[in-house]
Amino acid sequence: MERLILAAEEPSPIAVYPAELVLGLVSFAILFFVLWKFAVPRFEKLYEERTDAIEGGLKRAQEAQEQADRLKKEYEDQLAGLRAEAARIRDDARAEGQQIKAELREEAEQEAARIKARGDEQIAAARAAAERSLRGEVGGLSVQLAERLLREQLADDSRRSATIDSFLADLGETGQRSGAS
């Protein structure tokens, strides 16, 4: 019980004293005024600066993204143009290669035709020379053979000349027939 009595004599911890209440309210009002006048504007200013920085950063980031997208599109367009140019150059090179190949083939065919024509001319000239040579030799051999066989009959020069001419004419006709075939 003693405790109860002691507790009753002491002031109540939850009791409000009017002087403390007024002093608390005045202190709160002064603190509120100081904060409202000095701290809140600074906080507002810092808030606006941070908002501007964030919004500006976002805006700058968006502009940078737009610029990067624009540059990417330009590079892609340039790359597409370069690819098209490379394809055109390849096609031109192929076409030029085919043309050069055709020209070389044509030149080779012309050269082969010239070589063949020269060969034919040389063969014809060699044939004519051989024919002339053989005519002379065959004529001489024929005369010798005929003289041996017919010594008595060919003693006369006019007969001998007629026989040689006749033999050569026959030989010419035979050569022409074999040359025609």
Image: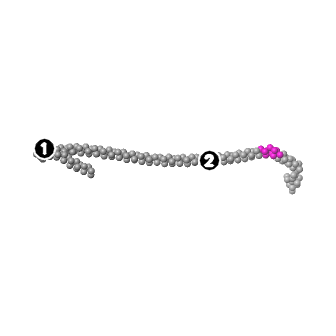
Q: Earlier in the sequence, mark 2 or mark 1?
A: 2
Q: Is residue 41 left or right of residue 164?
A: right
Residue 20 visible in image: no
Residue 73 shown in magenta: no
Residue under the image location 43 percent in, 46 percent down: 100
The three-letter amino acid code for the residue at tag 2 is Arg
Task: Say which of marks 2 and 1 sits in front.
Answer: 1
SS for callout 1 = loop
Question: What residue is shown with label 1?
Answer: 156
Please report the bounds of the magenta region as a residue range.
33-42
Q: Is residue 116 left or right of residue 43?
A: left
Q: CA distance from mark 2 to mark 1?
A: 118 Å
Question: In the image, residue 49 lies at what x, y percent?
Answer: 73, 45
Residue under the image location 33 percent in, 46 percent down: 116
Q: Residues within 10 Å of mark 2 (few under 14, many from 20)?
A: few
Q: Is residue 16 left or right of residue 158?
A: right
The numbered dot on residue 70 is 2
Question: In the image, residue 46 lies at what x, y percent?
Answer: 75, 45
Does the CB distance between marks 2 and 1 fall below 8 Å?
A: no
Most prominent secondary structure in the magenta stretch?
Answer: helix
Question: In the image, residue 119 lies at what x, y percent?
Answer: 31, 45
Q: Is residue 158 left or right of residue 52?
A: left
Question: In the image, residue 47 lies at what x, y percent?
Answer: 74, 46
47 or 31, which is in the foreground?
47
Residue under the image location 62 percent in, 47 percent down: 70
The three-letter amino acid code for the residue at tag 1 is Asp
Q: Residues within 10 Å of mark 1 (few under 14, many from 20)?
A: few
Residue 87 visible in image: yes
